[in-house]
Amino acid sequence: MMRKAELPQLPRKDGEEKAEELPLMLHGVEEGYGTSATSLPNSVHTPSDQAEVDSCYSWIVVMAAFVLHVNIGIMYSFGVLVIPLSEDFNSGRGSVSLTGSLLSFMASLMSPVAGMLGQRFGFRFTVFVGTILQTLGIGLSSFSTQIWQVYITFGVIAGTGTSFAWIPVLACVSQWFKKHIGLALGIAVAGVGVGNLLMPPILQALIDYYSWRVAMRWLSVSVFFMNSAAATVLKRRLHTHRKLEIGDLFRNRTFLLILIMGGLESYGHLVPFYHIVAYAEDAGISHSTAALILSAMGVASTVGRVILGWLGDKTSHTAMLKLSGIMLAVSMALWPLLSTTALLLLFGCTFGFFAGSFVTVLPAVLSQVFGPERIASVTGIIYCGFALGDLIGSPITGWFYDEFGSYTWGIWLASAVMFVSFVFMYLVQVPANNNTTDLKT
């Protein structure tokens, strides 16, 4: 019978707690440890782990991740397509918003696969596969003659591609930073905010002068060239084929709290991004001005990602996560009471600021709790928990409008769910002394 490999422990400072061990599975013969299941200490890495973190190359990775996140911003720019698609296919807003929700759903659902592929085959390869799928899905959607075809192309195919181009990038940045991980992630995911700033007016202009179909074709070409260029500089710092034992992960209290919290928060996270344009138009605001409100949300999102990411480095990423959670729930509850351009702009900037910071500090918390060597797999599984909320939140809000002629009750339902999310968020605690958590408790 094969024995467990006995691995040396790295020296610890006096008084420092021993890092807890995480059971992992080795696939194939790696580092001479054999193929049996074994328990590896957190301190053991492959030789490539010696690559310097917080280095100049680390910031090059951040810039590449920023570019990739610009195109991930299509999830937050779907609002400008709701009315054109509704008119073209003669469908209700609930049915049309299901398209964007499917994209977000698939991006979350396929996260474990994206994490596994990134860990097994490398971040660059996985992102390129995602780029191909995004390009095909967005481009093919422009030839749809029925709404269900848009569900498959833009929702399922492009959504899967978005996951493959998203999760490995978060993992890659997390591996290359320690001291400045919050700021680095903030700058990287700020690309989503920039995409949210630039895409709505560009797409709206293309829709106004041509059609939504031309807009989608332009978007598919943009995604291909920008993502392909950015992916070339991505590489792993931690080369490992180790796989988390899922059973231990799901028995861990901290993991379950974050998983439930994220699943509930995702219900309302995209609702304003998908419905703010239509909501504003119903309030008598012009379509172009409504699109600018959506762009302003993108600007605020960009600022929030960087500022609260930086503050998380200086204070606590967990505290910034909780601040974002309560502010998202409160601002969502106030939204139905607003109807003027100025107040909707204020709401959009507030919600965008904290929505952006939420998606920045969460990966930083995961890296701190579970360790950078596990970040690809853990992030993938956590983001998979977002899938159901991503899928049903915006369509249910749209269906409330279709049924009652008002967004009010749909928005307040989303706010209530986000308040429940905050309760679970409040219970999340990060291990002391920066030790990674014990997945057996």
Image: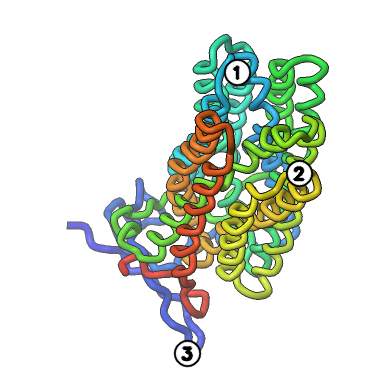
Mark 1 residue element? helix
| Residue type marked 1 | Ser
Identify residue for label 3.
15
Q: Which mark is residue 79?
A: none
Q: Position of residue 29 (x, y in %)?
A: 36, 49
Q: Position of residue 249 (x, y in %)?
A: 35, 58
Q: Quadrant of residue 3?
A: bottom left
Q: Identify which residue is drawn at 53% across, 55% down.
A: 238
Q: Report crowding for label 1: few under 14, some 14 to 19, many 20 or more residues within 10 A (C-alpha).
A: many
Identify residue for label 2.
194
Identify residue for label 1.
141
Q: Note whether 372 is above or below 18 in the view shown.
A: above
Q: Position of residue 114 (x, y in %)?
A: 49, 40
Q: Is residue 207 left or right of residue 242?
A: right
Q: Earlier in the sequence, mark 2 or mark 1?
A: 1
In this rendering, the label closer to the viewer, 2 or 3:
2
